[in-house]
Image (cartoon, rainbow, N blue to C red):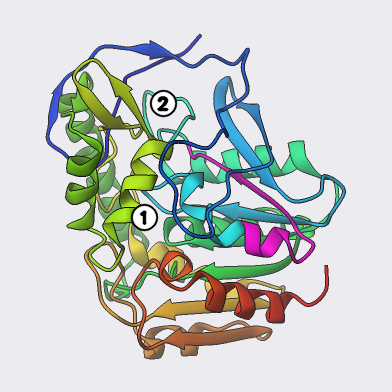
Amino acid sequence: MTTVPPVAGTDAPEQSTTRHVDTATPPPIAPTDRSVEGARRPDRSRWVSSGGLHLAVYEWGEPDAPVLFMAHGGFDFVGTFDVFAPLLADAGWRCVAWDQRGHGCSEHAVLYNWAADTRDGLVVLEHTTDEPAVLLGHSKGGGLMMDLAHAAPHRVRKLVNLDGLPSRNNWPDLADTERTKMLAGELTGWLDRRRTVSTAQRRPGTIAELAERRQQMNPRLSLDWLEYLVTIGGFESEDGWRWRIDPSLRFGGFGPWRPEWSMQRLPGIGVPVLGVLGLVQEVMGWGTRPEDVLPNLPPEGRFEAFEDTGHFLHIEQPHRTAELVLEFLGRP
């Protein structure tokens, strides 16, 4: 069985031990001793194997309802949907989401790359339904869902992208030889860093300390919400709490990848697309503006911007975001 280091979120790495993922027991969905208004743990959970790596999969809603397939952002986990997903499930959708490799309760990989995350998503979708599904993703998850829509267009009904439209960098007009050099540079940098953190973990802390550290990256989210997230997306050991996130994953990178590679997918998507941006700039956001998105909308694309909301719009304004999504999707 694959071994997984106990891990945390955005703290400095230290020497690690290892632990096993227990696939004999479904991923945990029981409530913890922390709560926030509207949060509801998933109704069901299960394991799905993607190339031998075990992924934790969760569901809200009736098992026979139409599937709304959801992908969380980088350094997040399915628990970040605990308020948002129940609103969609109560409207008649079967909300299915998975902890991405190296995140939450899913196993850690020796190496990571964007294509592997996309393949994981397709594997989970194939294990969930044979019918075309609605895809929804936040941040990194929005980019993954755009790639999945390109890779398997016959499996997609509609697509919702929540602040996952990165365009921080200019799109240089480069010859193929120069693009190859850029990719080689990304690969080299990623592998060099991976060697330095191969046995690392994040330093521990109390629930309050982990929440305060995360608030530096999520300044618009309340400490009550962040402390709730610690109890869902972390685990307690003898020396304190740690996030269940592989420390070899670097902030702003998910294997060799550049933000503009994701935006280039948007114009070619052949199903109705809803793109939503939170316009208040945050550390973990992309810095994308409406003028970056509008020229790249596909023929069946729709764009909305929340002026008073940051990157985590489905957490900051779950009801407003859910109402917009439900209006776009129509009746299940």
Q: Residue 58's spot in the image, x, y percent?
A: 63, 40
Q: Which residue is mark 2?
A: 109
- Amino acid type at image mark 1: Trp
Residue 70 appears left or right of 244: right
- Amino acid type at image mark 2: Ala
Q: Residue 232's spot in the image, x, y percent?
A: 43, 38
Q: Is residue 250 magenta?
A: no
Q: Is residue 75 visible?
A: no
Query: Which residues lie in the magenta part?
Result: 86-100
Q: Residue 324's spot in the image, x, y percent?
A: 61, 80
Between 77 and 140, the residue placed more toward the observer is 77
Residue 85 appears left or right of 110: right
33 shown above or below 315: above
Between 71 and 147, the residue placed more toward the observer is 71
Q: CA distance from mark 1 to mark 2?
A: 29 Å
Q: Is residue 97 magenta?
A: yes
252 shown above or below 324: above
Q: Quadrant of residue 219?
A: bottom left
